[in-house]
Structures are given as C-alpha cells and as structure tokens.
Image (tube, rainbow, N blue to C red):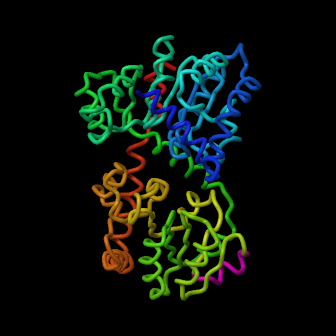
C-alpha cells in the first residue's frame, strides 16, 4: 500500500510540476540527483548521510554536521533535501561534500541511490521517515538515527490505522528525541532505543548569535543608535495590523519589520499601513536610515542578526498556520511576543512558562504588554534575562547526539 501511495504521489508531482514552479524545481532536481551523485561521489570515501526535509530541519542538523566535519575529517558528508525551500537556499552549502535532492522513496530509486553511495550511517532530522530507504538500511546494517525528533499522539504512528506504517520506526537504530512525552509515546509501541537529548536548534541559534556579533550592519546600526527598537520578524498581515497600529501612535519607538513574504505587493501593503517615515533596507543608506522611524527588511538572511538591536521582539505566524522561529529572537536576551497559534511549538510553550515569551490574542493584549514594557524598566529587564537564560539552559543537544552514536 505504501508503494502504491508513493507512485500516485509521484504521478501527482509530475502533473503539478507543469503549473507550479516550486514543484517543478523539486521534480527536476530529483531527476538530476543521480547525475550529481555519479559525478561527485568518491567511491573510496566514507560518507555520513544527513537528510533534511527543508531549511528548518537543515538548521537542526547543521550543528551536528559541522562538529563532525571538524572532529572527524576522515568522513565526507552527503546532505539531501526533500523540499526546494531547503535545497535552493543551501545547495552551495560548504559544510557538505555533496548536496542534492533525495529521490522519491520508490524501490527503484532506493536501489539506484545505494548502488552509488554507501553511507557509514544516516541522520534523518525531526519528522523524516521514509519506508524504503530505511528498510534498505536496516537490511544492510547501516545505522540510522532520528535526530531532534518529536512525537505527538495525533501522528499516524499512534493511530488505530497506523499499524503498517509504524513498522518503519523499527528501522531506526536510535532516536534522539526532544522531550519526555516523545519517549513515552514511543514506549507505548515497545520502542525503547530512545535518548532525550533536546533540540539542536538551541545550539544553532547560539552559533548564529556568536557569528552575527561579528557581522557589520551599518544601516541597522545607524537606524537603531540611541533609540528603543522593536523588531518584528517573519510577520504576516494579521500580525502587522496589530503592531503597526500600536507604533503609529508611539513615536518614542522605532520599528524594524522583516516580513515572512518579501513580495512587492506585501511590501507596499506594509507601507500603506504606516503613518511614520519608512525606508527599505535595499534602497537606503545609513544616513537616510538614521532619520527614519521604520526600517523594512526587503531581503533574506539578516533577521537573526537584526534581532540583536531590539529591546522587544515579535515573531509572526501566530494568527495563521503557526509561529516561526522564536529562538532566533530569544537568544539575544530580549522578550518575544507572538500570536495564539503556538501550542504545537514546544519552545514557545516553554518560553511562555519561563516568562520570557508573551502570547497575544488581540490588539488590546499587545497594547497592554507593550505599555508595561514601556513604563516598567525592571519588568523589561527581567523578561529579557529570562528569555536569554532559557535558550542557554537548553543547549548541548548536538554534543549528546554525537556521543550517542559513538563518534
């Protein structure tokens, strides 16, 4: 049944690729994978294989890859992606020797894949469980590790109809899970080869902070100098309706907006909501930014560093499909505000519990929190320290994983 579903999915992807550019990139990329592997694989080398669905999972695997590359140079690294949003951004990642798409999980693709490359071990990040790949590795004694994985009762493995697919979990050599709940759920299936190591994203954001501290950002520095700055990251229109309304009336704050979708229509929509002077990052100078009230980030790759100039931060998505990365903000010792759709995100729940994070459901909630930050310096300082301390206390997962696999 699984293979039938995969082939149906494959047909759907082929058809959809005619009209959807993202799917077309994935379709073409998967078809080119075997050429890439034939050209770049060194038959005499020993490979560690890392697989990430997309960019977020890549960031979780990255601390492990980079530690192993430094401590075990005798291994080469193969990095595969499922989604174009991961591959297109990181296809030139220098921390891996080969970067490519993972061919769809058909029996034929699996045989072709392992005919070319023979990994010493494989690391699948978070939610990735591919039946044919993992069954092959189990059969051929290739260790497979599930890293930063997290399990919930709603997943197919724990449903009455999930019996056939949950067998893929028996192919995993060891699970490195994020929390106790995941360990308990796996135990209900008789799976005990589990270690609670936490989430490697905490290691990653601390690394980003360290490298970002050395990054020069003259436009941001000129904009922020001498002012209280609020940074809104990965925002969507419902988020912007709330915080822009507040800052239009509070002239003593400056605001940086880094929207999740950087498209001209969205950028113009943001500008239309502001009644304060605003400049776009790619179209301004430090001199112009120093005179503006709002700085709009209209490019990628800066947000994690820009959080460093904030007194208070906001992470978007909580009024839509779910909040984005709160750790990138909290690591800078600043409180993080976010919307109500955060229940599936363990780090958001823990940040709320430590009081380094604040949930809002309306403009009135946001106004109340910001007014207190504005008037109570001690409260702002305590909330900031709690946010940063939370991230620091959760670090160390990458080293635990490496120790757990015996490297």
Percent of width and height locating residue 82: 56, 38
Near-viewer residue (363 or 132) = 132
- Residue 34: name its quadrant: top right
Percent of width and height locating residue 312: 44, 69
Q: How many discs appear?
A: 0
Residue at the image point whose x is 40% and y is 63% from the top:
320
Is 232 situated above or below 68?
Answer: below
Residue at the image point whose x is 37% and y is 70% from the top:
380
Is 380 situated above or below 201?
Answer: below
Residue at the image point whose x is 55% and y is 52% from the top:
209
Percent of width and height locating residue 336: 40, 63
Whether residue 371 sits left or right of residue 56 in the image: it is left
Is 142 situated above or below 9?
Answer: above
Percent of width and height locating residue 138: 46, 15
Q: Magenta residues?
A: 284-293
Is 45 situated above or below 213?
Answer: above
* The N terminus sits in image quarter: top left
Whether residue 98 sits left or right of residue 3 in the image: it is right
Q: Is residue 247 magenta?
A: no
Residue at the image point whose x is 46% and y is 55% from the top:
325
Whether residue 47 sits left or right of residue 275 in the image: it is right
Q: Is residue 292 magenta?
A: yes
């Amino acid at each position: 049944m699984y293979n039938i579903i995969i082939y149906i999915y494959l047909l759907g992807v082929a058809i959809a690729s005619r009209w959807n550019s993202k799917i077309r990139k994935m379709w073409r990329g998967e078809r080119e994978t075997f050429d890439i592997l034939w050209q770049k694989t060194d038959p005499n080398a020993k490979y560690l294989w890392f697989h990430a669905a997309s960019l977020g999972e890549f960031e979780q695997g990255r601390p492990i890859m980079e530690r192993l590359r430094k401590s075990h140079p005798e291994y080469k690294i193969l990095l595969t992606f499922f989604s174009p949003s991961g591959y297109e951004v990181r296809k030139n990642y220098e921390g891996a020797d080969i970067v490519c798409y993972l061919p769809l999980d058909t029996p034929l693709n699996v045989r072709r894949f392992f005919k070319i490359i023979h990994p010493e071990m494989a690391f699948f990040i978070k939610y990735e469980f591919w039946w044919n790949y993992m069954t092959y590795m189990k059969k051929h004694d290739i260790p497979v590790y599930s890293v930063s994985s997290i399990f919930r009762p709603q997943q197919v493995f724990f449903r009455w109809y999930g019996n056939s697919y949950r067998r893929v979990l028996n192919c995993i050599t060891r699970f490195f899970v994020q929390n106790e709940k995941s360990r308990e759920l796996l135990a209900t299936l008789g799976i005990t080869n589990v270690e609670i190591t936490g989430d490697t994203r905490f290691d990653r954001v601390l690394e980003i902070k360290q490298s970002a501290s050395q990054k020069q950002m003259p436009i941001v520095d000129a904009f922020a100098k001498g002012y209280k700055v609020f940074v809104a990251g990965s925002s969507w229109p419902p988020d912007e309706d709330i915080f822009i309304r507040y800052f239009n009336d509070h002239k003593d704050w400056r605001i940086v907006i880094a929207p999740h979708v950087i498209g001209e229509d969205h950028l113009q929509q943001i500008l239309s909501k502001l009644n304060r002077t605003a400049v776009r990052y790619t179209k301004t100078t430090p001199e112009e930014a120093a005179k503006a009230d709002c700085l709009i980030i209209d490019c990628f790759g800066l947000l994690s560093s820009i959080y460093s100039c904030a007194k208070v931060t906001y992470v978007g998505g909580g009024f839509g499909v779910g909040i984005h990365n709160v750790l990138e903000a909290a690591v800078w010792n600043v409180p993080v505000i976010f919307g109500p759709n955060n229940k599936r995100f363990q780090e958001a729940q823990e940040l709320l519990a430590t009081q380094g994070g604040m949930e809002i459901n309306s403009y009135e909630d946001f106004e109340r929190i910001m007014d207190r930050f504005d008037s109570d310096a001690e409260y702002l300082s305590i909330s900031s320290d709690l946010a940063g301390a939370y991230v620091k206390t959760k670090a160390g997962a990458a080293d635990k994983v490496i120790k757990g696999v015996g490297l």
